Image (spheres, rainbow, N blue to C red):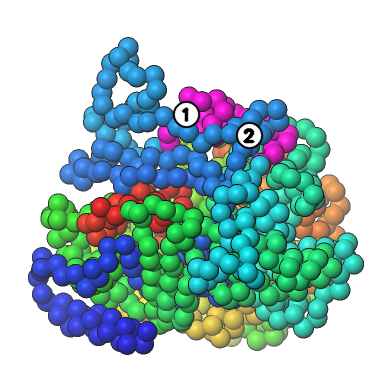
């Protein structure tokens, strides 16, 4: 094994040294096994202990492995790599998608049975309507001879098929869903591919899926304790303490997620029920399309685990939870019943082998090798290494965006020599950024001086603590100061036109969910103009704040196209620079008139570089930003701190000691309502700042208009006390999280999508305009990816990459 790694490392080093070789150099073939798929990633190996238990939304790489190794009820089947005319930028033949039963046998929704996954055959010919075969599907083309999207859902005429329109219609009005499992389809194997476990074969059955669901529910420590109490189980303290170290497993509350859809969770967990039964707890119909897709398509919440094997080893799973702590601790401590099984894991590699008992397709991949970098290298170096490795067939796939401009142009120029396709990174559940503006640091040691503290927070450094009352201390000038320093700089200039600025914690592909969802707005990034309208103070008085009307952050993007855009200082100044610098300077001048002997305004701005390379270009940008601040007012002295290790990250973001803080939380659902409700219910400081600005902006009726209504709903309930001690209020607020969240969700049910976008804009304005080189997304729909010529890979739809659907040609 070590020998192979050394050989590969030597090859990559050689390719790096010989980078001057022509891009069109001869292809070699170091991997003669076409059925071995090799992918190299410039990240650390994410497969830790309890790897299959980590929710899919937390890590895209682990999700890809789960989609191949997890035993599923059903999935989306994908067929054919899209055929693309790159000259005219149209799709001639898209990937075909459809629902496919895996272990599922039939689904009954209310009284309607669906026991088939058949679909129509697709015909792409232009045939007159009266001559079309009724047993074929003729998709309408979007433009000329092709399609805009590289994927196509294929319907069925059979009303009992899960690909029929009747299936989705039934899910929209579901009260009960009963799923039968094919209990003689396949059996469990271990990490060596052996099916005889304890001298017998164990078939996958319905109890396996219920046990899998129970395990995912038990990952939440609150549910685990309530389950133990309900079943008279004494938790093993040592095992519990060791397990709690796996923090990524302890946060997501699947029980609350299911309850939010009005699901009777304990009915679903009924091990005496011969089916999987999703029943309405309130006995009324619900729209369960999203629930169904998340449970059975996107997530690993209901993947099977071997009930009989567990029961034989631990006896009754209701009497103790030792199985929960021990199953899947490593890849060897679990069992497999799907397309692939994990055969080897080490610090820089994960190897998968095909499960020939399950999949007998002779044209699919038989071995998959994911390789990782234990130490991150620069994007340019990695791209160059991968390009040369691809030419030698050392890797199977090449990310187009990792290449430099010359390599990209060469590939496009000779596109017939390459197997080019599309890919797309989808961000639905994972927050775009965990770092937000800190509206009241309370640590003993802080990374700013008294002058900054008094301007931003209204108190000296040593007066800011957990007993501080934000509502009483913060004045309009403090709020204005903190907003203005974060709007002074144009982040499009910082990032050199690499993409679009995304200054929001909300995932960019979050579904817009409302009773009147806009026809042009499906996911959040479709509506960038509406959610990036920053609050920029234009006049500051003792008891009031006025803001610039109709400010748009996208105005900053236009600066990059101006004739002066070659001037870095010009590019780095906000489109509203004159107004911002005037207001900022006025606030500072008044401060020094009141405190003439005060020191300069010194503050650290921490920049997260855990996943980025710090280089001379970025250093130059930061030096120019400091110069701009100092030109606005000579007393402004920001200091940028590069956060490149976990110790610094903890110190600056987790200790409540700097102007930024770690504000991470989980989204139970991937829609706008869930984000708004969770963001406010999880952040007491945000609630206080909203309240404060609300009291200062009565003349601006449009400011926080819908957010004020949410505050009124919460204040009416008298759930939130107004104790003098901030820490006491924070504790009280956190205890009432689910109640507060439910009140917000109820309000959001009855407002338009535009009103929801306005609330997200309010949240963004107060939290997310942080200085960062990470505030960036690509709004173009798809990126290019290159595969070896013998690979036919269907496109990944909605973040679902099924390597089992690859065909070797």
Which quadrant of the figure contains the N terminus?
bottom left
Front of the two marks 2 and 1:
1
Residue at image point 65% right, 80% down: 655
Whether 498 is among the magenta residues is no
| Image location (x, y in percent) of residue 351 | 43, 72
96 and 478: which is toward the camera: 96
Is 264 on the left-hand or right-hand side of 299? right
Q: Quadrant of residue 369?
A: bottom left
Q: Please provide the residue range marked out in magenta.
A: 153-179
* Secondary structure under the numbered disc 2 in the rendered image: helix
In this figure, which residue is indicated by the disc labeled 1?
Answer: 156
Residue positioned most to the top: 130
Number of residues whose C-alpha sits closer than 10 Å to that of mark 2, classed few (under 14), some (14–19) or many (20 or more)? many
Identify the mark nearer the N-term, 2 or 1.
1
| Image location (x, y in percent) of residue 462 | 70, 84
| Image location (x, y in percent) of residue 67 | 50, 57
Whether 164 is among the magenta residues is yes
397 and 85: which is toward the camera: 397
Distance CA(mark 2)–CA(mark 1): 16 Å
Residue at image point 23% right, 81% down: 11
| Image location (x, y in percent) of residue 130 | 32, 12
* Secondary structure under the numbered disc 1 in the rendered image: loop
């Amino acid at each position: 094994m070590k020998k192979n790694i050394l050989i590969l490392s030597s090859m990559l080093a050689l390719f790096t040294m010989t980078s001057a070789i022509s891009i069109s150099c001869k292809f070699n073939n170091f991997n003669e096994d076409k059925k071995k798929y090799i992918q190299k990633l410039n990240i650390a190996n994410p497969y830790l202990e309890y790897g299959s238990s980590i929710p899919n939304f937390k890590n895209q790489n682990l999700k890809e492995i789960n989609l191949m190794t997890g035993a599923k009820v059903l999935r989306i089947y994908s067929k054919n790599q899209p055929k693309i005319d790159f000259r005219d930028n149209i799709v001639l033949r898209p990937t075909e998608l459809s629902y496919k039963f895996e272990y599922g046998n039939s689904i009954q929704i209310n009284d309607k049975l669906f026991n088939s996954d058949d679909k129509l055959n697709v015909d792409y010919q232009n045939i007159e309507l009266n001559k079309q075969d009724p047993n074929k599907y003729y998709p309408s083309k979007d433009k000329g001879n092709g399609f805009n999207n590289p994927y196509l859902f294929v319907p069925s005429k059979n009303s009992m098929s899960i690909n029929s329109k009747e299936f989705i219609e039934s899910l929209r009005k579901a009260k009960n869903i009963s799923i039968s499992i094919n209990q003689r389809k396949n059996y469990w194997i271990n990490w060596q591919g052996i099916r005889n476990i304890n001298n017998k074969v164990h078939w996958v059955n319905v109890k396996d899926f219920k046990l899998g669901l129970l395990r995912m529910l038990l990952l939440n420590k609150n549910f685990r304790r309530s389950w133990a109490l309900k079943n008279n189980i004494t938790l093993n303290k040592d095992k519990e303490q060791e397990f709690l170290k796996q923090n990524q497993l302890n946060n997501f509350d699947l029980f609350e997620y299911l309850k939010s859809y009005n699901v009777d969770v304990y009915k679903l967990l009924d091990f005496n029920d011969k089916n999987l039964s999703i029943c309405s707890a309130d006995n009324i119909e619900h729209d369960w399309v999203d629930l169904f897709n998340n449970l059975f398509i996107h997530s690993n919440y209901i993947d099977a685990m071997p009930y009989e094997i567990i029961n034989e080893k631990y006896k009754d799973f209701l009497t103790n939870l030792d199985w929960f702590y021990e199953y899947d601790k490593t890849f060897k401590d679990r069992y497999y019943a799907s397309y692939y099984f994990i055969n080897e894991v080490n610090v820089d590699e994960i190897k998968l082998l095909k499960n020939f008992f399950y999949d007998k397709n002779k044209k699919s991949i038989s071995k998959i090798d994911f390789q990782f970098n234990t130490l991150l290298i620069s994007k340019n170096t990695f791209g160059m290494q991968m390009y040369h490795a691809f030419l030698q067939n050392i890797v199977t796939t090449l990310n187009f965006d990792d290449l430099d401009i010359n390599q990209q142009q060469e590939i496009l120029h000779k596109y017939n020599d390459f197997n080019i396709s599309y890919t797309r990174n989808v961000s639905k559940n994972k927050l775009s950024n965990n770092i937000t503006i800190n509206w009241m640091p309370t640590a003993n040691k802080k990374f700013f001086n008294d002058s900054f503290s008094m301007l931003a927070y209204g108190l000296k450094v040593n007066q800011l603590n957990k007993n501080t009352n934000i509502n009483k201390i913060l004045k309009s000038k403090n709020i204005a100061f903190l907003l203005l320093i974060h709007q002074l700089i144009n982040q499009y200039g910082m990032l050199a036109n690499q993409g679009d600025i995304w200054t929001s914690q909300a995932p960019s592909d979050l579904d817009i969910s409302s009773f009147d969802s806009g026809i042009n707005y499906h996911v959040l990034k479709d509506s960038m103009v509406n959610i990036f309208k920053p609050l920029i103070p234009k006049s500051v008085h003792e008891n009031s704040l006025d803001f610039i009307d109709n400010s748009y952050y996208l105005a900053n993007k236009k600066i990059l196209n101006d004739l002066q855009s070659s001037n870095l200082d010009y590019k780095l100044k906000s489109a509203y620079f004159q107004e911002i610098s005037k207001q900022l300077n006025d606030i500072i001048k008044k401060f020094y008139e009141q405190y003439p002997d005060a020191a300069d305004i010194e503050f650290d701005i921490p920049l997260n570089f855990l996943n980025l390379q710090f280089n001379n270009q970025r250093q130059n940008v930061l030096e120019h930003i400091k110069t701009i601040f100092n030109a606005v007012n000579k007393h402004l002295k920001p200091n940028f701190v590069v956060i490149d290790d976990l110790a610094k990250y903890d110190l600056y973001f987790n200790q409540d000691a700097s102007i930024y803080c770690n504000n991470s939380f989980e989204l139970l659902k991937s829609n706008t309502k869930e984000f708004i409700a969770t963001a406010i219910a999880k952040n007491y400081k945000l609630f206080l700042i909203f309240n404060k600005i609300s009291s200062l902006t009565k003349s601006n009726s449009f400011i926080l208009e819908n957010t004020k209504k949410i505050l009124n709903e919460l204040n009416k309930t008298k759930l939130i006390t107004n104790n003098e001690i901030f820490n006491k209020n924070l504790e009280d607020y956190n205890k009432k999280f689910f109640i507060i969240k439910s009140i917000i969700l109820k309000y959001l049910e009855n407002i338009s999508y535009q009103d929801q976008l306005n609330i997200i804009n309010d949240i963004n304005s107060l939290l997310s305009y942080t200085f960062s080189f990470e505030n960036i997304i690509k709004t173009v729909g798809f990126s290019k990816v290159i595969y070896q010529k013998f690979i036919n890979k269907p496109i990944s739809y909605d973040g679902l990459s099924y390597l089992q659907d690859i065909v070797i040609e």
